[in-house]
Image (tube, rainbow, N blue to C red):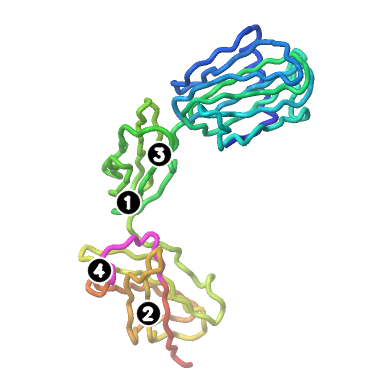
Amino acid sequence: MRKWFTKKIQPLLFALAMIAGVCSGSVETVNAAETSALYELGETEVTAGQEISFPFTLNKKSEVDVNIFIKKVSAVTVSVYDSAGKNVDWAEKAFTIGADKFTSVKSGYYGYVDTLSDVPAGDYTYKIVFTESTSAMVGAYAAPVPATMSQTKATITEGYTKKLFVSQGTVSSWKSSKKSVATVDKNGKVTGVKPGKAKIVAAMADGSKVSCVVTVKANKFTDSRITTNDVKKNRCSMEAYSAAFDKKGNLAIKVTFVNNTAHKITSLKNVSVKVTNQYGKAVGTYKVSSLKLRVTPNSVRRFTVTIKKADLKKKTEDLRNAKISCAGKYVYQKD
């Protein structure tokens, strides 16, 4: 993929300083993580229609910056070919850089940086054709694309897993900074052990490292507790604010009932508390035709309902990402 940058002044000045006084081109193979010179051509007189080309080799996917300097502002045409002499897919065919794209740098020169990003390993030739006679300098530099983790921060539920990936390069090993909180296998699969934080580090074959800070949270559903301020006047509302599996595998759900009316609630009818996972599939439902619940006017009552393990459609589930809906009708005492 080619990215065109017209205001990369710092790279232009750097390249200008690097190649000033160099009289001939040189080629290096990129094999280190730091920026390497592919080609450097000192001040040279060129004529209209003249072509300057140079081959370069990349041992790994890299970003290549070609710095083009001219004294006479004019357009130039550039193209990139592979080892078979074909235009590479990621660089388009011959591309004209207009005179207006060049930026004044120093010493009477104007410069442009042609950035080729994510260039695959291989052999290439870069060609520049000048449309006007002028003095020119060229510098080409490359830096391997660094390895990156699919995420730098991640949150998982205790007892559940998350797969991490590394792009660019080869992972030699995976490691967790705190195995008591989270473990990671050789394929980058992280398992939450208990609530806390751990850094998952991937060591690369070239000696570099990339990491992801993983936060493990308890396998528990939590939501805010509603109050009378959250419910309209002369209305009632019922919402779950907590849910967790107990030691026997039953699912205990804590519910808030708000009575924001002037009546005294004596019971609830056709109560239903339904739990679904993050994909919308049912985990379990608590149902009862009548539930005694005394709630005075304009007040709140909290209670717990339990779905037995035997009645759960899923014996284990990621409750942290679950949804709980409550329904029912209230019965009030008439004045």
20 in magenta? no
Q: Is residue 267 visible?
A: no
Of label 3 and label 2, which has the lower sequence position? 3
At x 28% / y 71%, what residue is drawn? Answer: 313
For disc 4, the neighbor class at 10 Å (few under 14, some 14 to 19, many from 20) is some
Quick one: quadrant of the N terminus?
top right
- Residue 277 falls in image quadrant: bottom left
The residue beneath circle 2 is 272
Q: Would you say the residues marked 2 and 4 are in contact, meaning their CB atoms lie under 8 Å apart?
A: no
Comes first in the chain, label 1 or label 2: 1
Instruction: Name the residue nearer the viewer: 135 or 216.
Output: 135
Q: Amino acid at mark 4?
A: Asn
Quick one: label 4 or label 1, which is nearer the N terminus?
1
Mark 1 — residue? 161
Between 322 and 84, the one lying in front of the other is 84
For label 3, the residue is 166
- Label 4 SS: loop
Mark 1 lies on a secondary structure that is strand
The amino acid pointed to by label 1 is Thr
CA–CA distance in space, label 3 to label 4: 39 Å
Say which element carries label 2: strand
**Within the image, what quadrant is residue 91 found in?**
top right
Q: Is residue 320 magenta?
A: yes
Residue 192 position in % (x across, y down):
31, 49
Residue 324 visible: yes
Q: Is residue 47 left or right of residue 92?
A: right
Front-lying residue, 297 or 220: 220
Q: Position of residue 214 (x, y in %)?
A: 38, 44
Residue range highlighted in magenta: 313-324
Amino acid type of disc 3?
A: Val
